[in-house]
Amino acid sequence: MTIAEPLGIAGLGLIGGSIALRARRLGIRTMGWDTDASALRLVDVPASSLAALGGAAATLVLALPLEATLAAI
């Protein structure tokens, strides 16, 4: 499977954080956004907002809580 880079991850909790760590181990450049600023250490490039992440990422993973995911969509 080929992932277009950068891989954007919205929500860096258990699921999104795990995806970010695995992607980085595989050499995939990652971007991320989360309301918890300390979680941004899991990605190569932090995004300033969800909109900025969506505009910059070639592949986007939504790993937000259900209500936030529905609002983001």
Image: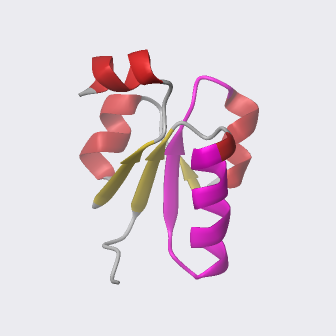
Q: Position of residue 26 (x, y in %)?
A: 59, 82
Q: Identify which residue is drawn at 30% across, 17% down.
A: 71
Rendered image quadrant of residue 62: top left
Q: Is residue 44 visible?
A: no
Q: Is 33 situated above or below 26?
A: above
Does residue 56 show up magenta in the picture?
Answer: no
9 left or right, relative to 46: left
Q: Identify which residue is drawn at 39% across, 65% down.
A: 6
Q: Where is residue 16 in the image (x, y as percent from the top left)?
A: 57, 47
13 left or right, relative to 61: right
Q: Along the line of sight, which residue is nearer the eye, 45 or 54?
A: 54
Q: Along the line of sight, which residue is nearer the eye, 56 or 14?
A: 14
Colour scheme of the picture: secondary structure
Q: Along the line of sight, which residue is nearer the eye, 46 or 21?
A: 21
Does residue 25 show up magenta in the picture?
Answer: yes
7 left or right, relative to 27: left
Q: Identify which residue is drawn at 31% across, 60% down.
A: 59
Q: Is 33 situated above or below 19?
A: above
Which quarter of the rendering shows the C terminus? top left
58 left or right, relative to 26: left
Rendered image quadrant of residue 37: top right
Q: Is residue 27 visible?
A: yes
Question: How many marks on residues?
Answer: 0
Which quarter of the rendering shows the N terminus? bottom left
- Farthest residue in the front direction? 66
Highlighted magenta segment, given as a residue range = 15-36
Q: Along the line of sight, which residue is nearer the eye, 23 or 45?
A: 23
Q: Where is residue 66 in the image (x, y as percent from the top left)?
A: 43, 23
